[in-house]
């Protein structure tokens, strides 16, 4: 590589992989889920998202749930050569609204969600792959350019990574509006058909800055690499079947793959970046699908005051189309297993807890400094307090514990990837 700006070949992947519940989805769409993950057979108002067919088992009336979540995460990359790097993302408000109107055997339901993304990720000190590539290119240039070698020597710098600093920021939001209808038949069974309209928004900002006072080096290493936005939309068909009899409930839901094509609106782009990455010039288009999901679950009330549930989720990641065909680097789809329990301490007060195991089809080819999720355990818990039969408040907390992933690159550098995630949720539920 002859030009240090070729580092930008990896920049456009940054924001598209910065957030997600699965690889691309947020599944934490209510405070009730945060305090108890087993919602796949729900017949409460959380069913609007998790078990839409279950909305047909509600009592007649209009139900509304308003939720807000605060999420903070870190991403850490440890290397045996370049040191440690850490990125941060913070979502102060992640709202969701779930509504259900039920009359007789019919229910009409809908909601608003942030189905993907929802915040901003920042790497203030760049990334090891950035330092690796730029350092190699600076060394190559210095060997062929005696003047550049003199400038570096005069600055008293022996490590090329001290010549520059980089900063990358990415944003991703996928707003979703859902609407559908369910119908109860034979008293115990129900079916749902609906759809979700998804609007996706990404933003990328990248810059490089010289670390020393030199006009020559400033010209080489201080500039804006990319400043652009991407937008696109897609529709998700949804089908669901439910069963409820006495103390037992079951649900199954299928969300079809959502094809989303992102169109780029570019405010500023370096000329070299534009020549190497034409898909990020103004008007260019790329894929950003939401993969299909199959979820199944059951729940059982052992006593009037004690309930448990289990669920399974399968994400069809390898059948979706991601930017730069990243799906081809996976060796399988994502699978999740959930368990939840809740107990009524008194009639008005419920405590709950849940656990979730998430397994990804990650490979060394897929994982990179800009794109990594690892197998994880999530734990959550919380409370619900019913002020009246028509009004309750829910509070929950969940934490995801990611497993370290270590790989040795062909360059000889060993990297260890790790993440943290914390989530606080609050919800208000009304029967109108």
Image (cartoon, helix red, strand yellow):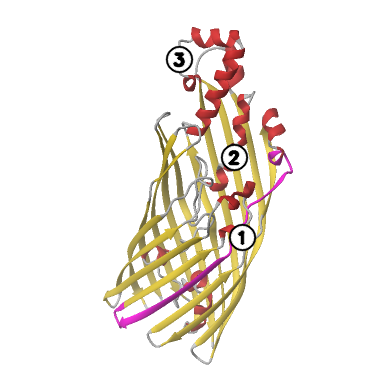
| Residue 29 lies within the magenta run | no
> Where is mark 3, residue-wise?
158
Gap between marks 1 and 3, in whole Å?
Answer: 48 Å
Quarter of the figure with residue 10: top right
Residue situated furthest right in the rendering: 283
In this view, the residue in front, 217 or 359, is 359
What is the quadrant of the N terminus in the image? top right
**Sequence-first tag of 1 and 3:** 3
Q: Which mark is residue 204?
A: 2
Q: Residue at x 53, y 78 (%)?
A: 53
Quarter of the figure with residue 317: bottom right
| Residue 304 lies within the magenta run | yes
> Where is mark 1, residue-wise?
319
State the SS at label 1. helix
- Looking at the rendering, the stretch of residues picked out in magenta corresponds to 279-306
Q: Is residue 325 above or below residue 49?
A: above
177 to the left or right of 344: right
- Crowd tier of the residue under label 2, counting other residues whose Cα lies within 10 Å: few below 14, some 14–19, many 20 or above: many
């Amino acid at each position: 590589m002859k030009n240090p700006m070729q580092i930008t070949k990896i920049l456009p992947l940054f924001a598209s992989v910065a957030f997600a519940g699965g690889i691309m989805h947020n599944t934490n769409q209510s405070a009730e889920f945060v305090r108890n993950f087993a919602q796949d057979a729900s017949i409460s108002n959380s069913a609007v998202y998790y078990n839409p067919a279950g909305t047909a088992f509600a009592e007649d009336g209009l139900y509304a749930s308003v939720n807000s979540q605060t999420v903070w995460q870190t991403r850490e990359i440890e290397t045996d050569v370049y040191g440690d790097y850490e990125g941060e993302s913070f979502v102060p408000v992640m709202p969701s609204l779930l509504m259900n109107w039920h009359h007789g055997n019919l229910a009409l339901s809908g909601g608003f969600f942030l189905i993907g993304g929802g915040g901003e990720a920042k790497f203030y000190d760049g990334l090891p792959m950035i330092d690796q590539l730029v350092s190699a290119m600076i060394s190559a240039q210095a060997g062929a350019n005696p003047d550049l070698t003199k400038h570096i020597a005069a600055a008293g710098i022996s490590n090329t990574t001290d010549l520059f600093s980089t900063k990358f920021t990415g944003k991703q939001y996928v707003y979703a509006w859902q609407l559908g209808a369910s119908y109860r038949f034979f008293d115990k069974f129900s079916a749902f058909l609906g759809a979700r309209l998804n609007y996706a928004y990404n933003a990328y900002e990248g810059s490089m800055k010289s670390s020393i006072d030199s006009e020559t080096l400033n010209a080489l290493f201080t500039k804006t690499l990319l400043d652009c936005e991407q937008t696109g939309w897609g529709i998700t068909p949804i089908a669901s079947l439910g069963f409820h009899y006495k103390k037992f409930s079951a649900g199954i839901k299928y969300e079809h793959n959502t094809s989303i094509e992102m169109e780029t609106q570019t405010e500023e782009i370096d000329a070299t970046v534009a020549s190497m990455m034409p898909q990020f010039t103004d008007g260019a288009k790329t894929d950003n699908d939401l993969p299909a999901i199959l979820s199944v679950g059951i729940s059982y009330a052992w006593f009037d005051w004690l309930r448990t549930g289990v669920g399974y989720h399968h994400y069809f990641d390898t059948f979706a189309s991601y930017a730069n065909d990243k799906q081809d680097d996976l060796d399988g789809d994502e699978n999740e297993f959930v368990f939840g329990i809740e107990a009524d301490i008194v009639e008005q007060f419920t405590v709950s807890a849940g656990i979730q195991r998430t397994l990804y089809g990650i490979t060394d080819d897929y994982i990179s400094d800009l794109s990594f999720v690892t197998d994880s355990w999530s734990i959550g818990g919380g409370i619900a307090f019913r002020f009246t039969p028509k009004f309750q408040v829910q509070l929950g907390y969940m934490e995801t514990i990611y497993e370290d992933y270590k790989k040795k690159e062909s360059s000889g550098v060993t990297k260890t990837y790790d993440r943290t995630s914390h989530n606080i949720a609050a919800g208000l539920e009304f029967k109108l």
